[in-house]
Image: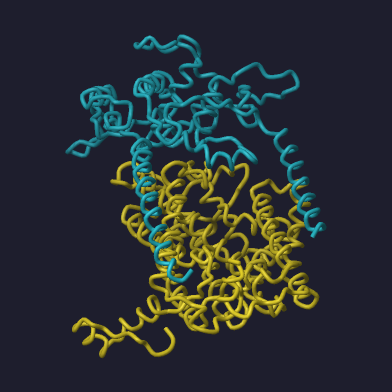
Chain colours: A yellow, B cyan
Amino acid sequence: MSGHSTYQPQNAFMQWLEKRLPIGGLIHSSFVAYPTPRNLNYWWTFGGILSFMLGAQIITGIVLAMHYTPHVDLAFRSVEGIMRDVNYGWLLRYLHSNGASMFFIAVYIHMFRGMYYGSYKEPREVLWILGVIIYLLMMATGFLGYTLPWGQMSFWGATVITNFFSAIPGVGETVVTWLWGGYAVGNPTLNRFYSLHYLLPFVIAGVVVLHVWALHVVGQNNPAGIEPKSDKDTVAFTPYATVKDSFFMAVFCLFFAWFVFYIPNFLGHADNYIQANPAVTPQHIVPEWYYLPFYAILRAVPDKLLGVIALFGSILILAFLPWLDTSKVRSARYRPLYRQFFWVFVVVCVLLGWLGAKPAEGIYVVLARVLTIYYFAHFIVILPLLGIFEKTKPLPNSISESVLDAKA
Amino acid sequence: MTMHRTIIALTLAASLAGIGAAAAAEATVPPAQKWSFSGPFGKYDEAQLQRGFKVYKEVCAACHSMSMLSFRNLAEPGGPGFSAAQAAAVAAEYKIKDIDDKGEPIERTGRPADYFPSPFANEKAAAAANGGTAPPDFSTIAKARTYERGFPWFVIDIFTQYQEQGPDYITALLQGYEDAPKDFALPPGGNYNKYFPGHAIAMPKPLSDGQVTYDDGSPQTLEQYSKDVSAFLVWVAEPHMIARKRLGFQVMIFLLVLAGLLYFTKKKVWSAVH
């Protein structure tokens, strides 16, 4: 999307159109001629996979919406009706429910990749922040969508999460009543959640356009973490990145299909096959797996308001990452200490996720507190200090040199 | 670097100790059964589903509704394999509440398109007749019941495709009635069950040896009844499972070939720059 297009249409109609709306040139410069660093590894294919997943969720979602009934008495049955009586309804529903999980698996890999290779650093701060906004929107969309089947976890999850807002001093209760559209999670809640669940994916799509736009202005980061210096350092997006992305997208689809066709309920919760019942509270209310680390952080803090602040803080702190990480070197490949701390951080996140699924009692609370403190310390203490004290390895002179070094 | 390793090791050790402590407090783990429908090529055993249906109809249906299943489902492919005439005959055994052309409430003979009628007029009636809690509906119960798998089993389950916690649990539950231990305070109206979380279940022992007559020579034992009705309930909860697994295999083959072709295309394209 940057610079003057070199697009020369051969087709007479495209020449005519190009003079009036240069959309061919836009596509050509963005997805054909766009130079990508030649040393990108497969971790860089997840951006394309995420676009694919967004499209897949929107398409399956639109068809599901044709058969779904957002009413507290009918929603549960209508979802089961889709699974039983709509042609390939079971496929649509399992694609959509597992697709949400796949979307989050891909986004977590995408984010950790960005952290490992320092992709958030100057000049890519805005690109990174747009990514954090997309992630927040995804969290909201996933939560709203999980409410729609109106199972026990849908209902109680919605009750617990919306109750966060009651922690706001003074206006908390009013805000929660306003969110619910009543004095408890009920039919107005389900209706508005359905409406918003349909709206937000298109907001995500809009921010994705900004994300891709910002990407095409600053160019991709790469495993060496240095900017391309000559034509030797880059290859054209098409065919090089296109074919590589396509291959790995097919591999990702194999993984996706394994869940959809063979273990479609593995990532869900059995209690959500029980219709919502406000009179019966499940033994453990557990959110979807992709929220578990944050749920652990919430419950690790003894005070409700501070817990909610810690929860949102743990996500919002990501937006400040470009400035919290003081190191001039981007890639962990040349940062021996950061590389260790990165993997410790990954393990901490996974363990927090595991604790989020456990009851908040005994040893689990102690562990969750220790890991929550470490989570924040990673951003507030470790990253700023590492940039000052870490002795980094010498950077290669160019991307092509780093590729040749790797081969030698 | 060694310090970080130590931190990881300590964290892992602490978390594993936590798992052990938690597992000790859990209910008895149901034994894993052999199911004809497990695994990527699993299929329902038609005779087993028919036997399970007989157990449901003659025993469970007295209290448990199955409101999302219609009679026509019994004759649909991938199910118990009844003929359309047999499904219609089953429907005809039931009386369905309806409204006639004059608007008067009537009871008419069931048709294949009807859903299984509930044994109670409404949920309150069901609860009142059963000590305060309505017996759960059977439409999705095989997916709605599970037991804690714990680490590392829940990871291994991804690869083995184990997803039969529901039927394993139901089979075990039906056979899990025994006398309460002396130190166990059984609440009034409760029955002791080894596998029920908390052990005090409202449902009295529903099945015993010889209770249902099988026409196909299968053993008329509690064990056999439990397995058959559990398998039947899996089909009730997942009536398209066989179609799903069959399509899944085709999709897998397609994606493997596609990924293979794309891999070699990628190699060819990139050979110019490597």
Q: Residue furthest front?
A: A408
**Which residue shows up at 56% across the image and 61% down it?**
A109
In the rendering, at what x and y percent does residue B177 appear? Answer: 59, 19
Q: Is residue A96 above or below residue B106?
A: below
Q: Is residue A393 visible?
A: yes
Left or right: where A162 falls relative to B59: right
Q: Nearer the viewer, residue A339 or A140?
A: A339
Note whether A321 is above or below B70 in the view shown: below
Task: Find residue B57 and report its image quarter.
Answer: top left
Query: B264 or A213, which lies in front?
Result: B264
Dividing the image into 4 quarters, which one contains the N terminus of chain B? bottom right
Q: Can you give x and y, in whole percent of width and height, for residue A237 in the image? A: 42, 74
Residue A353 in percent (x, y) is at 64, 53
**View extreme (left): residue:** B101
Give left or right: position of A96 versus B70.
Answer: right
Where is residue B265 shown, x and y percent of the image? 38, 61
Name the one closer to the observer, A47 or B176: A47
